[in-house]
Image: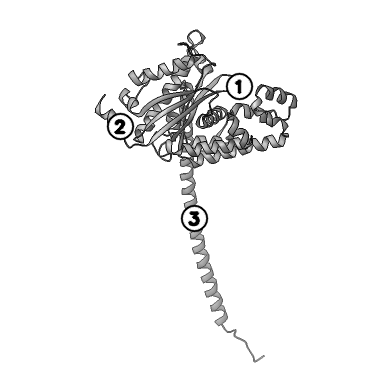
Amino acid sequence: MPKCLLLWGIGMDEYTLYLDESKNSEKTLFVIGGIIIKNSEIAKLNSAIYDVKKCIWAEDYINDNHPILHCTELSTIKNSRSNKRFLSTYLNIHPTLSILGTQSSSEIKSIYDNVYNICCKTIKAIECVTIGCLVDIEKFKYIYGNSIYPKEDILFEVALQEIIENYSHFLLCNKSVGNIVYESRNDEFALTEKSPDFKMYNNFCKIKACNKGVTFIDQETISKTIRYLYMHSKQEDIPGLQFADFVAYNMIQSTNRTTEQYTEFMKKISDRLYNGGHELTGKDLRDYFGLKKLPYDFQRIHLLEDANTALKKSNDNIKTERNNLIKRNNLLIEGKNKLVTQLEDCKTEIKRFNDNASSIKPNVDNSV
């Protein structure tokens, strides 16, 4: 092993990237997303997730059963809280959350809001960065056509490759090392070579060994910055993965919203997106390093460029009109100043005339 690889990592900060995936209801978009957190901050994150759980369950239940938070389930319950029939059926499928069936509609909304209030405070308080890759399935079909449209597993691998490259870039910029933690994609007991977890780990090894699918970061950099990929079953109580679930879900939900329509948690995710080590005031590269969107929409880029050109022309026209108005305003000010001067001269002349008139004595003939 090269000497630089042996030395790299000694005395450095260590990070963990917690990742999860999410899809929109139409299954036209999916995202792999999560948080990069310094290992020294993980205890704070674990404590925050415990506080989130206390919004729903009693502490004794949490300690005895280790319930798993699932953002989609919580959102479904909140959105259907007024439909008691549907809610009852849904809670039968998800018995861990059956306690919410005894709550009123307003109480469920309050619990939901409290959960997200804690999530907002957490992402603000801990030293973390958000990262992800969004895949637009319909756009792939539009660009490549259905005949050569790649399978979802391929799109998943491509998205993960993009995240690994940007994660390695983050670690390199911070002179750090890190691991990746992912929730298992397998069905229970599925451990064959065709299983999603096996394919994911195999792809990870190829990336580390020969830079498979990575564009700009070299193999040596990835090998010395990223150590391991850990996969945990869906039944394991891993707080970082549960928080990553909230991040990935809200990345998807924010896709069709304007910035003004973002929830507070969406704003926090956007604010914390990895920006390639640059100050946000200087360069905003979050769409490249933070939440990369695939495939690249060149049509939209061209439309935006055309719109930008039109805006520049409009701006130039406005500047020209502004300069013309400034010149006209200067001429008006100059004319006003002349009139003021003339007015003062008239006042002086009137005063002089009045003074002269008062000094002239009338010649009266008193002999008559």
Among numbered discs 3 and 1, the one appearing first in the sequence: 1
Residue at the extreme left of the image, as rendered: 3
In the image, 68 versus 123, the foreground residue is: 68
Residue at image mark 2: 8
Q: Position of residue 12 (x, y in %)?
A: 34, 36
Write down the quadrant of residue 6 in the picture: top left
Looking at the image, which residue is at 33% across and 19% down? Answer: 209
Q: Mark 1 touching mark 2, by CB under 8 A?
A: no
The label on residue 198 is none
Indicate the secondary structure of the residue bearing disc 2: loop
Write down the quadrant of residue 257 in the picture: top right
How packed mark 2 is, by other alpha carbons closer than 10 Å (few <14, some 14-19, many 20 or more), is some
Indicate the secondary structure of the residue bearing disc 3: helix
Residue at image mark 1: 25
In the image, 35 versus 217, the foreground residue is: 35
Residue 106 in the image: above or below residue 90: below
Q: Position of residue 358 (x, y in %)?
A: 57, 80
Q: Position of residue 339 (x, y in %)?
A: 51, 60
Marks 3 and 1, how far apart at CA: 63 Å
Residue 35 in the image: above or below residue 331: above
Write down the quadrant of residue 361 in the picture: bottom right
How packed mark 1 is, by other alpha carbons closer than 10 Å (few <14, some 14-19, many 20 or more), is few
Task: Between label 2 and label 3, give the one nearer the viewer.
Answer: 2
The label on residue 333 is 3
Looking at the rendered structure, the kind of residue marked 1 is: Ser
Marks 1 and 2, how far apart at CA: 44 Å
Looking at the rendered structure, the kind of residue marked 2 is: Trp
Looking at the rendered structure, the kind of residue marked 3 is: Ile
Can residue 282 be seen here? The reply is yes
Q: Is residue 187 left or right of residue 96?
A: left
Q: Position of residue 366 (x, y in %)?
A: 64, 91
